[in-house]
């Protein structure tokens, strides 16, 4: 029995499908099972990672857990929740992030700091563990969809920032292999796409996927910061995003071959991702 948390998310629902195809017995954790819309054959159980006392039914008889943590919002419950999981499950595969610091205090109260804290708790839990550390999700560029559906220009910052974005299906494919086979104990798998593209090149790839040319128009960091704040993003998070993109202009993200090494298949290109999501941009 494998418990999948975050089963309705970008990665989790592909993990569920992949495990079913591999013949695994799958249970999914959901705060609202009635709206989960998961494939036939999946047992959906109500529960919330932020409420460890609510996890008993979900963990009953579970061997392994695919863990997607609701970062920051549930960090207060992390020690108790990880203790509860460790009392029931033998192993955990945790969806972390590239760039996690060795010391959680280094990036306290940030998403990377949250991931670092969860990793440390898992390492001390006594469970067999594997960390998946993907870089940027290709799916994050869906933020451009509203602009593309209404025009031919994407306005954003740092068009020259180079990213090795990864298809969510490749993250899931690695997760499935790690969950169903041996040989990944204590591994920290850094996952990327197969190439580094600038944001300008990403926009052009979307244009080819939808059959019309698109262009990138540079926004100033101040304008982008103001727009993100108007959309409700905290200032420190907006600044972290802008600083990160600025850094990738002079130091583009590198590429790893981990997806191919684990799954036996090359990671999907950004162009493949854009083709898979073309309807989201039309």
Image (spheres, rainbow, N blue to C red):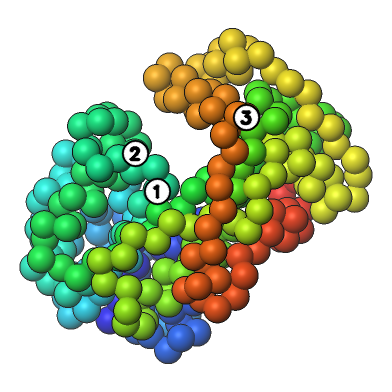
Helix, strand, or loop for circle 2? helix
Q: Are marks 2 and 3 in contact (CB under 8 Å)?
A: no
Q: CA distance from mark 2 to mark 1?
A: 7 Å
Q: Given this view, does label 2 or label 3 mark the residue nearer the observer?
A: 3
Q: Residue 192 sits in which quadrant?
A: bottom right
Residue 26, percent across and down? 35, 78
Q: Are marks 2 and 1 in contact (CB under 8 Å)?
A: yes
- Mark 2 or mark 1: which comes first in sequence? 1
Q: Nearer the viewer, residue 24 or 164?
A: 164
Given the current orientation, which residue lies at the most extreme bottom position? 23
User: Which residue is painted at 54% across and 64% down in the image?
Assistant: 257
Residue 164, percent across and down? 60, 48
- Mark 3 or mark 1: which comes first in sequence? 1
User: Which residue is painted at 57% across and 34% down in the image?
Assistant: 251
User: Which residue is painted at 31% across and 65% down in the image?
Assistant: 187
Q: CA distance from mark 3 to mark 1?
A: 20 Å
Judge the density around disc 3: few (<14), some (14-19), many (≥20) Cα neighbours within 10 Å: some
Question: What residue is shown with label 3?
Answer: 249
Q: Given this view, does label 3 or label 1 mark the residue nearer the observer?
A: 3
The answer to whether 109 appears left or right of 244 in the picture is left
The answer to whether 243 appears left or right of 195 in the picture is left
In the rendered view, tell whether residue 84 sits above or below residue 3. Answer: above
Question: What residue is shown with label 2?
Answer: 112
The answer to whether 29 appears left or right of 172 in the picture is left
In the rendered view, tell whether residue 102 sits above or below residue 131. Answer: above
Q: CA distance from mark 2 to mark 3?
A: 21 Å
The answer to whether 118 appears left or right of 236 in the picture is left
Q: Which mark is residue 97?
A: 1
Q: Nearer the viewer, residue 122 or 193?
A: 193
């Amino acid at each position: 029995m494998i418990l999948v948390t975050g089963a309705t998310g970008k990665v989790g629902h592909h993990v569920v499908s992949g495990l079913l195809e591999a013949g695994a017995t799958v249970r999914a954790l959901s705060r609202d099972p009635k709206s989960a819309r998961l494939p036939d054959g999946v047992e959906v159980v109500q529960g919330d990672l932020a409420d460890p006392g609510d996890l008993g039914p979900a963990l009953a008889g579970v061997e392994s857990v695919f863990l997607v943590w609701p970062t920051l919002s549930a960090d207060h419950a992390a020690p108790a929740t990880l203790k509860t999981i460790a009392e029931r499950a033998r192993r955990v595969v945790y969806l972390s992030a590239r760039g996690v610091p060795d010391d959680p205090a280094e990036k306290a109260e940030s998403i990377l700091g949250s991931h670092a804290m969860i990793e440390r708790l898992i390492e001390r839990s006594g469970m067999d563990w594997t960390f998946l550390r993907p870089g940027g999700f290709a799916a994050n560029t869906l933020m451009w969809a509203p602009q593309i559906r209404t025009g031919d220009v994407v306005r954003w910052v740092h068009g020259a920032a180079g990213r090795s974005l990864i298809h969510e299906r490749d993250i899931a494919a690695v997760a499935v292999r790690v969950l169903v086979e041996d040989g990944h104990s204590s591994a920290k798998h850094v996952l990327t796409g197969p190439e580094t593209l600038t944001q300008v090149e990403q926009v052009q790839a979307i244009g080819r996927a939808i059959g019309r040319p698109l262009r990138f128009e540079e926004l100033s960091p101040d304008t982008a910061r103001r727009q993100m704040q108007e959309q409700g993003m905290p200032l420190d998070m907006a600044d972290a995003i802008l600083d990160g993109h600025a850094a990738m202009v002079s130091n583009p993200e590198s590429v790893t071959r981990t997806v191919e090494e684990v799954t036996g298949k090359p990671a999907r290109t950004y162009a493949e991702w854009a083709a898979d999501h073309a309807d989201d941009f039309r």
